[in-house]
């Protein structure tokens, strides 16, 4: 198995950047398109445990578009073979200097492109 195949890694980096832009811009349609539409897709958030795309979709559509801006740091994207990747990043939000967010995503290449199948978002005090 090749780790960090340059083509696969570039594709996931582009998908990750697209996700981040959609997240801070509250582009719900793009966020939904980047998650695998399946009842087994999971997103653990700061205050919610979402099982399946229907729950993730409902969360995204009801979330406030305010206060979504953030700064990323320590981002690591690793590909395993040509069809699996893990993306990990830290983030901070303006006015929350005592907290750091952590985000992890598992990406799989499907026939229609790279999709998140599992995600976890949490915060810790610094």
Image (cartoon, rainbow, N blue to C red):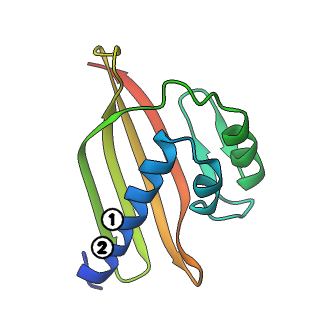
Please tell me whether residue 107 is drawn above or below residue 26 in the rendered image.
below
Which element type, helix, strand or loop, lies under badge 1? helix
When asked about the image quadrant of residue 61, the answer is top right
- Residue at (30, 38) in percent of width and height: 90
Please tell me whether residue 84 is drawn above or below residue 96 in the rendered image.
below
Pointer 1 and pointer 2: residues touching (CB < 8 Å)? Answer: yes
| Of 71 and 56, the residue lying toward us | 71
- Residue at (29, 66) in percent of width and height: 78
Inter-mark Cα distance, 1 to 2: 6 Å
Task: Report how many numbered discs are placed on residues in the image.
Answer: 2
Please tell me whether residue 23 is drawn above or below residue 118 in the rendered image.
above
Quadrant (top left, top right, bottom left, bottom right) of the N terminus: bottom left
Packing grade of label 2 (10 A; few <14, some 14-19, many >=20) is: many
Q: Position of residue 69 (x, y in %)?
A: 41, 32
- Side of 60 where 5 appears, left or right: left
Tag of residue 13: 1
Quadrant (top left, top right, bottom left, bottom right) of the C terminus: top left
| Of 20 and 107, the residue lying toward us | 20
Q: Position of residue 65 (x, y in %)?
A: 59, 31
Tag of residue 4: none
- Side of 57 where 122 appears, left or right: left
Please tell me whether residue 47 is drawn above or below residue 119 in the rendered image.
above
Which element type, helix, strand or loop, lies under badge 2? helix
Q: Position of residue 39 (x, y in %)?
A: 75, 59
- Residue at (59, 46) in percent of width and height: 43
- Residue at (34, 79) in percent of width and height: 8
- Side of 25 where 60 appears, left or right: right
Residue pointed to by mark 2: 9
Packing grade of label 1 (10 A; few <14, some 14-19, many >=20) is: some
């Amino acid at each position: 198995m090749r780790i960090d195949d340059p083509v696969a890694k570039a594709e996931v980096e582009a998908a990750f950047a697209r996700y981040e832009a959609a997240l801070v811009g509250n582009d719900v349609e793009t966020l939904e398109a980047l998650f695998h539409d399946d009842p087994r897709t999971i997103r653990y958030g700061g205050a919610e445990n979402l099982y399946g795309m229907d729950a993730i979709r409902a969360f995204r559509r009801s979330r406030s578009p305010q206060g979504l801006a953030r700064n990323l740091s320590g981002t690591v994207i690793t590909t395993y073979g040509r069809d699996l990747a893990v993306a990990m990043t830290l983030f901070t939000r303006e006015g929350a200097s005592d907290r750091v967010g952590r985000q992890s995503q598992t990406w799989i290449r499907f026939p229609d492109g790279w999709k998140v199948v599992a995600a976890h978002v949490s915060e810790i005090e610094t």
